[in-house]
Image (cartoon, rainbow, N blue to C red):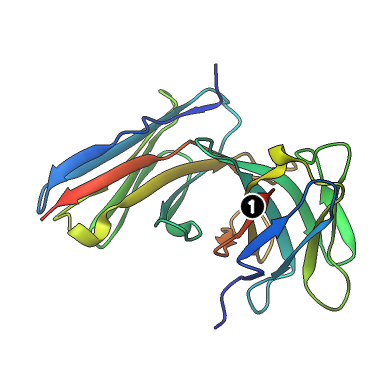
Amino acid sequence: QKEVEQDPGPLSVPEGAIVSLNCTYSNSAFQYFMWYRQYSRKGPELLMYTYSSGNKEDGRFTAQVDKSSKYISLFIRDSQPSDSATYLCAMKDSGGGADGLTFGKGTHLIIQP
Amino acid sequence: NAGVMQNPRHLVRRRGQEARLRCSPMKGHSHVYWYRQLPEEGLKFMVYLQKENIIDESGMPKERFSAEFPKEGPSILRIQQVVRGDSAAYFCASSLGGDNQPQHFGDGTRLSIL
């Protein structure tokens, strides 16, 4: 079983729709959870950074973490064609654990105009 | 540009040559991380460095790969005697350090081995 599972898609939705992206993980030591957006031929761009369980909202983006289910989500409201990209979830443990991030493979999102 | 700078953006090498990839962290950041992204694979952590120290190299291949972050100048990821399987995108990230500080990425170096 991979440490982080993420559906690669592609996920295609019409402009203006609410998008839901998800990851599951197996390592209960993960405490910090991130979502990155990656455009073709570019580096990952940090969207959301959360610690432990709960919700965090930033503009059109909402990140949710459910540690009991080992499940994280990213919601995008009022989706735009410019949101078309690959979305990567990432996570790490804390307190002297590994410093590198563990990534999902990414979900390719297409917003249709 | 205060972001993470990587160069070159593209690098072509023949089998057996050496590849050197450079990374300058964001201004004020002293913690650098290297990742590799193989085709159809996710980003994989390779090594974590602070100035003049390797902190965690648990993701580095045991042979041919090395990294440094000198007191002055950029961090360098060095691959000796490259093979076709080394073809990938190599990304550098930097942070302020500490668990609650996120990592910010550069746009990567795309290494192609002929």
Residue at 87% across / 44% down in the picture?
Answer: B64
Closest to the observer, A48 or A106: A106
Q: Residue A3 appears at what percent x and percent y?
A: 56, 26
Residue A57 image-quadrant placement: bottom left
Total of numbered circles in the picture?
Answer: 1
Q: Residue B99 appears at what percent x and percent y?
A: 64, 52
Q: Residue A16 appears at what percent x and percent y?
A: 9, 53
Residue B24 image-quadrant placement: bottom right
Q: Residue A94 appears at what percent x and percent y?
A: 65, 42
Compared with A23, B19 (above or below) is below
Residue at 83% across / 51% down in the picture?
Answer: B55
Residue identifier under label 1: B99
**A31 sits left or right of A99 in the view:** left
Closest to the observer, A105 or A32: A105
Q: Quadrant of the N terminus of chain B?
A: bottom right
Q: What element carries label 1?
A: loop
Compared with B25, B80 (above or below) is above
**A2 sits left or right of A11 in the view:** right
Residue at 67% across / 43% down in the picture?
Answer: B45
Extreme residue in the bottom direction: B1
> Can residue A98 be seen at all in this image of the molecule?
no
**B78 sits left or right of A110 in the view:** right
Closest to the observer, B81 or A23: B81
The three-letter code of the residue at mark 1 reads Asp
Chain hosting mark 1: B
Residue at 89% across / 39% down in the picture?
Answer: B63
